[in-house]
Image (cartoon, rainbow, N blue to C red):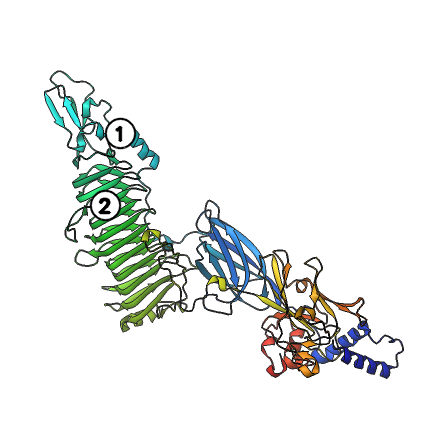
Amino acid sequence: MKRNFFLLAGLISFLCACDNSHDDMYDAEWVREQYENQWKMNFGDIDPNQNFNMATQVKANLTIVEDALSEYTFKIYTANPLYNDDALLMAKTTVTTDADGYAETSLTFDALVGQENYYVVRMDDHNRRLLKSIKVSNGSIDASFGVVKTQARSRAMETGALPTMDAPYTVAQVNQFIAEGYDLSNGIEYTNYGRPDYGIINHMQQIACPNNNTTGSLIGVVKPGFTSSLGLECTSYLKVKSQYGQYDDRYESVSITEQGTLKLVITNGAVYRISGQIKNVDVIVASGGTLELNGIYMADNARIIVMHGGNVVDRKEGANEWNYGIDHNAKSALIYNAGTCSIGWIGLNFATFYNAPDGVMYVDGIKFTTSESVLTNWGKIEVNRITGNGGKQGTLNNGCLLRSQEKIEIIYLNQDGNTALECEHIKANCITLRENSILRAKHLEVGDGTAEFYYVGKSESSALVSAQKITSPAGAVKVDGAIYFEANEFNSDWVAGLFDGAVADAYGVTKVGESNFAIFPVYKGDEIAESDCTGKGNIPNNYGPPEDDKAQTWRLACEDLGSVGDYDFNDIVFDVTYVAGDDTAYVKPVAAGGTLRTHVCNRVAKNMILGEIHELFGFDDITLMINTGVAYDWNGRNGFEGKTIKMKVPTNYSVSENMGGFYLLIENGNNTIYDVQIEPKESGNIPQMICVPSDWRWPTETINIGTAYPEFGLWGQNYGNGTWYNTVETEYVY
């Protein structure tokens, strides 16, 4: 309301109509009537559903099945936050999963009328983000991360699943072995009173017989200070006879038929050194114990079990890919590591090598000597090279982090979700990836025949293959699923194979750093033991971190008393910033084109009076028109910022409901009482307050909104016309 203009209009109307009832020239109700009468002449009829609010409520149903008893944050954006600097945060909420890794929640948020796509981000406690684009359906979106409980896993999800293995023994069992086993420090002599024999135990098969041990323990316990050694190649063991005659042997030989019959336990503080062949014996390295290797051969049913806190070191000199520190050769043999191992070269034939989630390994080299060789890593492995027997051999299952300084030659690479393999040069034929898995190399060489890439992870996620150089000697490439490829150099056959219908439009080959794939690294130190499973992660070029989130803001533009013929909607203009799920909204005035003392208020905030619009700009003079294009000489001020006000609100606050509860109190001409209250109207009524996106530019002083925005009237006539503000005459807006 421009007071002078109002007085003039009121006077003209008064004189023409000769209506003596208008003795008070400041009759707001009369002005409102004129305002509404002329609205139809300017803008036409109003859609009965039109509330002149471009904010509408959308319900988000969110589900997650991931790590148990873990906290996750959901964020909902207007656009892709990975690449779009204009992406606005609309809502956020945090959940904690139950013992099954399950959590669900729902919330409503304000969205732009007509918007069809939303971007939902799942963020873990390391700020790693999974992104999913969701279409709205019937006023709601449904986003699931992980495998929903009621959803059956597809066969493809199960294909090539990484093998898992429980520790052969628990800590409690190992402690019991230590308590019940024979302390080798007590002496390793044995006697046979049935015959004049006397001997020294030099073999594990004699462990049941020292010093007339009638309990017949098959467990040898190595404690600190014990420096002798036993032969560990066993097919049987000696057992004390329950009855024997004067000339009978005191012992009998019993064949070993079960794995783990004989056990050698290295206790806390003890160091035990072995060499030669291990067969039918479990060597258990307890927490704090150390096993020193000097060249060993793993035969049938041999097992080395390293508990958490246990250590293995390799003392063999000159080990290489033809002279192993560990020759791991039998299908029934096992190396299980949940401790820390520093080993030279390992030769894998048919045996099982399993690095548990707590396991850390530093290895010079691993050689797969047959196609049946398998290495499964759920922990951390740092190796110089993994080679085949004259070419690619075996299977590598990576369930956490594996780094190779030189090269990896493998037939099958199988990676679990949220993992990384980092390598100088990798050769592989078939690569299977899952959600957020990263294969990173300087040179990736795939295929002797057809190179195959499969994504079998969660449908809303993707994987990344990133290499400075990618080559495919065969030239034939098969890609199935959501895999991003990055390369700065690749041969033409590769490109042809990759883009020949193999990859969906959302994926393809880009330069390194340009893929829409973001995994935040968790920096804990340079040591691999201190690294996260995703290693160096992946941060795309020009990537905006989560803390750069810009909250969604709405702009409320108002006419104070509705000056007849004005309709510039710049009398009171203020921004409301709110993210659904928060308990605070922020209000900031951006324009004051009216010249009446007007107070911005809010009912949701307990009828809070936020302040007089001019005073919020720092001016006492209410005749000033601020940020409306009026020149200084005409009592205008431009380029001023208003004071931001915090407003406590419920966590389900919404601008779409009744304009967020905002209303205006306008003082009468004597500045004594509130004469007029401006508030949102019910649908189908002529507005004095509209809600638009914050990038909307208000008309300059006295410019009709229909002049600045030619489709404004069409919007009033059709609620669904949510694009009207994109058609703008820029010379008429501030």
Residue 559, percent from left and from top: 71, 73
Q: Is residue 687 visible?
A: no
Q: Is residue 18 visible?
A: yes
Mark 2 = which residue?
313
Q: Amino acid at mark 2?
A: Val
Residue 18, percent from left and from top: 88, 81
Say which quarter of the image contains residue 426: bottom left
Closer to the observer: label 2 or label 1?
2
Label 1 environment density (alpha carbons within 10 Å; few <14, some 14–19, many ≥20): many
Mark 1 = which residue?
181
Q: Residue 44 or 38: which is nearer the viewer?
A: 38
Say which quarter of the image contains residue 617: bottom right
Q: Measuring 12% from the left and 26% from the top, which residue is drawn there?
A: 199
Q: Which mark is residue 52?
A: none
- Sequence-earlier tag: 2 or 1: 1
In this rendering, position of residue 38 left or right of residue 224: right
Q: Measuring 39% from the left and 67% from the top, which residue is drawn there?
A: 515
Tell me if residue 382 comes above or below residue 80 in the rendering.
Answer: above
- Check disc 2 and report its element: helix, strand or loop: strand
Which quarter of the figure is the C terminus placed in? bottom right
Q: Report the residue that reaches farthest toward the top.
A: 246
Q: Measuring 83% from the left and 81% from the top, which residue is drawn there?
A: 11
Label 2 environment density (alpha carbons within 10 Å; few <14, some 14–19, many ≥20): some
Say which quarter of the image contains residue 307: top left
Q: Residue 250 or 403: which is nearer the viewer?
A: 403
